[in-house]
Amino acid sequence: MAGLHIAFFNRSFYPETSATGQLLTELCESLVQEHGCRVSVVTGIPILPAGARRSGATNGWILQREAFRGIEIIRARGTRFSKRRFVGRFSNYVSYFLSACYAGLRLDHPDVVVALTDPPIIGLAAYLASRRHNARFVMSYRDIFPEVGRLIEDFQSNTVDRVLSRVNRFLVRKADRIVALGDTMRQRLIDGKGADPAKTIVIPDWADCSEVTSGAKKNRFSVEHGLIDKFVVMHSGNIGLSQGLETLVEAATYLRGFPGIEIVLIGDGVKKPRLEDRVRELGLMNVRFLPYQPKESLKESFASADVFVISLKRGLAGYIVPSKLYGILAAGRPYVAAVEESCEVATITERYECGLLVEPEGAKDLAEKIVTLYHDRTLAERLGANARRAALDFDRRPQVRAYYNLFRELVPAPSSARVTSGSLVKRSFDLLLSGLGLILSMPFWLLIALAIKLDGRGPVFYARQRVGRGGRLFRNWKFRSMVASSDQEFGPLQAKVGDSRVTRVGRLLRATAMDELPQLWNIFKGDMSFVGPRALLPEEIEVNGNGQSVGLHEIEGYEERHHVRPGLTGLAQVYAPRDITRRQKFKYDLLYVRCQHFFLDLKLIALSFWITFRAKWEDRDRKI
């Protein structure tokens, strides 16, 4: 929707260097530049060098206004004491919160108000602003309190914990939508804070895969710091309370006998002085600290690493999601993750086979995994290649688009009101038919699973992330119809006539569409519908007439087709020849979005059964 006005509340924003501040800045930039939104940000006063002043800033007694790349920034004044002590942090947070409450009243009628969690009570200011302007309210969780607050080493209070817990329960109850960074975090919010599962969605963090790429190790950064001939084990990012980086320093004691290995910690944070003291105390010559690197230098600094370390203290899985993971994936580098099994990092690591896992606080195990990659460069190279492929599922554009579609869904166009009752009928029909289909098709599931296993090695099911309604990602299930290694070897390519990747059993499954039976579960869950546009891969591409690859998001009609749930069948699947271009298929999809009604769905389902009965789904020409 053109002109959608979104207001964000978070203390950290450009030019702050924290991960949350940088990601929020990228989100706001993309919403303005790529989706035509008007964006306002209520944020804090950044700490700049003495005498520095941001261009365009206008001072006020409580608020300071400026603009950055089309974003309206309202800086709420607060104290700026050192964050190394609790008293300073507490004063900074509370003073910013009070100013932010006032700033929210001065906003120019936003359509959606979004609160992040810096500080953890800022959602209250955003909620007041949403009520003042009759806007929709979204809570976007970066951390969950009071669990994360228990990391504070210089202050603990059961009273503060109870207050933060009640604040969170209030906010999730009042929010129109709740955004979590991963499935574990989503479950923490549902089980621990009482969040409504129907309102709680997952939109992960990201890296810009066009800016952070797999670069050569020999570059300006590695030359400047003498890292070319070293096996560099790198931690890059905030050196704070949650990472448990003491374990990495302890691991360095086990690595003294490997003169080629050097541990490099890049960044700043409250823990850095203590870690530096510990390194001096242990007399470690294989550990080096380097200052924070600006965003423009990330490609070279990341390329200087041979392996990264990601760590999170025990007990924090799901309460914090380390955002540094996505930059590491984009850089195409392997990593060792010292995290719990339930952590989102562990889930991604196992799903994409892009790193090695160790238990948190296991210094010896961490050192052994580093040595494994030091000796086995082939393994390290394979994990790094898998990491880069995984990064495409967490690229910046699809995640920003998911936010945009969420906001647009909350503030629908007036013309969408007419389909509300029809949507209820459609969902009820999907639920009833998919439930019945799951029960009746179970004997076929067993036969198909047996045939796949007899036909060759590999899993029975195939699952990939797909783009759903509103740009939300979900896991789409099918029976495996291709050789097990097809994705790793060939990437997400469309099947062709006589495709060598398709197994013998797979040819029959694809011709009859029986490989898509597991998608009945996706329909039952609400990820899909029986009828709608085809669910696409986030990283899927189109090859145009001159042989150049084009991202699907660049093709006209891509956004509009996500106004509805993706379908098991649809106009394009039934009526369009299989090998027409995406642009032509999208025209069929847009026609369905605009003309959808219940009887059209029934007709398409009946035609789909007829095509299945005749085993015509793989035909390149007309199917009916």
Image: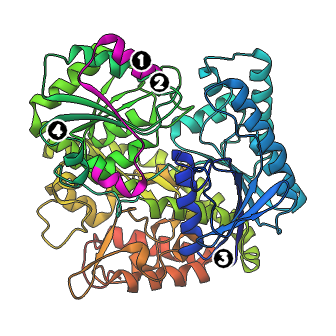
Residue type pointed to by label 3? Met
55 vs 212: above or below: below
- Dot 2 and dot 1 residues touching (CB under 8 Å): yes
Magenta stretch bounds: 274-300
- Which residue is tagged 2? 273
Q: Nearer the viewer, residue 196 or 496?
A: 196
Q: Nearer the viewer, residue 278 or 571?
A: 278
Q: Are there few (<14), some (14-19), or many (20+) residues within 10 Å of tag 3?
A: some
- Residue 329 in view of the camera: yes
- Residue 362 in view of the camera: no
Could you tell me residue 535's position as x and y percent?
Answer: 43, 64
Instruction: Name the mark nearer the viewer: 2 or 4.
Output: 2
Give the CA distance from mark 2 to mark 1. 6 Å
- Whichever of labels 1 and 4 marks the residue nearer the N terminus, that label is 1
500 vs 300: above or below: below
Image-based side of 342 in relation to 70, left or right: left
Residue type pointed to by label 2? Pro
Verify whether residue 276 appears in magenta. yes
Q: Residue 320 carries which label?
A: none
Could you tell me residue 510's position as x and y percent?
Answer: 27, 63
Give the CA distance from mark 1 to mark 3. 54 Å
Residue type pointed to by label 1? Asp
- Circle 1: element type: helix
Q: Where does the C terminus fall, quadrant-wise? A: bottom left
- Dot 2 and dot 4 residues touching (CB under 8 Å): no
- Which residue is tagged 4? 380
- Circle 2: element type: helix
Image-based side of 19 in relation to 189, left or right: left
Give the CA distance from mark 3 to mark 2. 49 Å
